Amino acid sequence: MGRTIPSFRIAEEQEAAVWRPFRKALLRRDRAAFDEMLSSARLYTSASSAAVRPSKFEGMAMAIIFHHYTTLARSVEALSEIGRGEA
C-alpha cells in the first residue's frame, strides 16, 4: 500500500510549523502580521489544493500573493471612487 498524501489543510499546517523558527525570530509586534499573512492562505485552500504542485509552500505563497493583490486592487478602486467623489 502506498503512502497517504495529507490533505492540503494538513500540509499547510505542517508548512506553517516549518516556519515557526522564522516567526520566533521576528519582533513581537511583527508576529501578528506574519500569523495574519499565513492565515490569508487558508482563504484559498481549495484553489491551492487544486493546483498540483510539488511544494506545499508554492500553493501557500500563491494564495498569500493573490490575497494581497485583491486587497490592494480593492483599495486602489476605493481610492479612485473617492477621488471621483463617488464614495
Image (cartoon, rainbow, N blue to C red):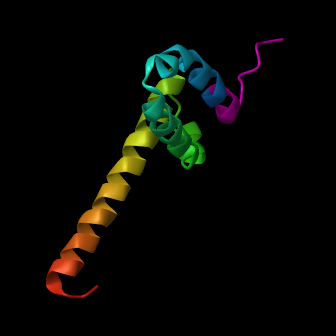
Q: Nearer the viewer, residue 23 or 40?
A: 23
Please give left or right for residue 4 compared with residue 33 in the image.
Answer: right
Residue furthest to the left in view is 83
The spot of residue 42 in percent (x, y) is: 58, 43
Most distant residue in the right direction: 1
Q: Is residue 36 above or below residue 27?
A: below
Question: What is the quadrant of the N terminus in the image?
Answer: top right
Front in this rendered view, residue 24 or 44: 24
Does residue 67 appear left or right of residue 6 in this picture? left
Q: Nearer the viewer, residue 4 or 81?
A: 81
Residue at image position (53%, 31%) is 52
Q: Quadrant of residue 56?
A: top right
Tell me which corner region of the image, top left, top right, bottom left or bottom right, holds residue 27.
top left
Residue 36's spot in the image, x, y percent? 51, 42
Q: Residue furthest bottom?
A: 86
Magenta: predominant secondary structure element? loop
Image x and y of residue 39, in percent: 56, 41
- x then y, percent, for residue 54: 51, 21
Question: For the image shown, how many numbered marks are present on the structure?
Answer: 0
Q: Residue at x 22, y 79 (%)?
A: 82
| Residue in the picture at 61% in, 20% down | 17
Q: Is residue 6 magenta?
A: yes
- Would you say residue 60 sits in the magenta stretch? no
Q: Residue furthest front?
A: 28
The quarter of the rendered structure image containing the C terminus is: bottom left
Query: Residue 77: which quarter of the image?
Result: bottom left
Residues drawn in magenta: 1-11
